[in-house]
Amino acid sequence: MSYSQPHKMWHRHSCLCCLLTVLNPLFAQQEPPLVRVPVRLVIAPTSVTDQRGKFINGLTLSDFILFDNDVPQQIHEDADFLPISLALAIETNLTVEGILPRIRELGPLLGTLVVGDGGECSIMTFDKHINVVQDFTSDLGRLTQALQHVEFNYVSSHLIDATVQAIHLLKHRPPERRRILLLISETRDQGSESKLRDAVAEAELNNILIYSLNVSRLHAARQIILPAYGGPSGTALSLDLKALIKEIYGGIKTLVIENPLSVLTRYTGGRQYPFFKQHSLEEAVTRIGEEIHGQYLLSYSPSNLQEGGFHKIRVELNKTGFTVRSRPGYWSMDEPSTN
């Protein structure tokens, strides 16, 4: 049987296609492997205070030196004003019902001191349930009204679950906004399904700064308003944050941390503010507002990201007589472990 010329050409083309199909994987194996270089922008909100604790403004980028694991980095500063998205999460556990009158007075303070021009705030309550009682709004009247209707119900406190949900709300805000979470809560967690690692990893991934107004269960139940900024001598928690972060990311399933608020605030660069005195709630919110609006937003792409594990951040000032505070570090890892 003989082939016509078109049939012969088709047959050769078909054979060539089959040959290339077989050889292509072989050629592909000889190509150099794809090298993925991690690129990460680390944001380090940095505060500078004088000896009296007053926040110092007007410094320039050349005044700062930032070290990542003791390696100096090339830093940038976002000098433009970034509007704030603030998520306020309030524990409504019956044991802290005594602070309810103070919480209902927070509306004007949040609007003028923390949120600021162009800012927005959402309000969430949590006990064993989590409820968003006010979505993000810049309307001070709506915030004040939402706080007036906060009610206390149950005895458990799903602090970590609430933190994770608040972070979820914040991470969907426009990227040009600063994202801040303020927790009014006891320091402990009771019954959350989420793990502290979930909250830590999500806060870090989305550059969320966490502050807390800590409520003492005992004092709140007695309706005593608790300690001012800084707290009394000897009440500070001693915490090896680097060791704890290593354990958290290491996936130790038996890990129990009595004060998850201390980890969340310190690791993200925020602070805890206990309140004992009558006016200390206003003082704490005022202090938070001053710090947020007075921070220098330093950022950098680490030159040593290939070093795994915890990276310590240290920010220095080429001037004397000032105190510099920034986030302590971050965990070098593209995605948190799922162990």
Image (cartoon, grey):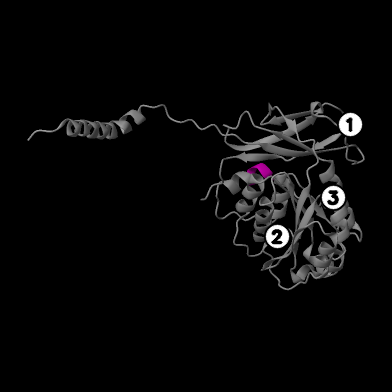
Asked which quadrant contains residue 68, the reply is: top right
Residue 315 in view, yes or no: yes
Above/below status of 91 relative to 337:
below
Q: Residue furthest left?
A: 1
Q: Which residue does the numbered mark 1 point to in the structure image?
A: 321
Residues at marks 3 and 2 touching, judged by CB atoms closer than 8 Å:
no
Q: Which mark is residue 188?
A: 2
Residue type at tag 3: Gly
In magenta, the rendered stretch is 240-244
Secondary structure at numbered mark 1? loop
Residues at marks 2 and 1 touching, judged by CB atoms closer than 8 Å:
no
Q: In the rendered picture of this protein, how many numbered marks are placed on residues?
A: 3
x and y, in percent, of residue 74 in the image = 70, 27
- On the picture, is 39 further left or further right than 96? left
Q: Residue 271 or 8: which is nearer the viewer?
A: 8
Residue type at tag 2: Arg
x and y, in percent, of residue 69 in the image = 66, 31
Secondary structure at numbered mark 3? loop
- Mark 2 Cα shell of 10 Å, populated few (<14), some (14-19), many (≥20): some
Q: Which mark is residue 116?
A: 3
Residue drawn at (59%, 62%) of the image: 193
Secondary structure at numbered mark 2? loop
The residues tagged by marks 3 and 1 sit, at their Cα atoms, a distance apart of 29 Å
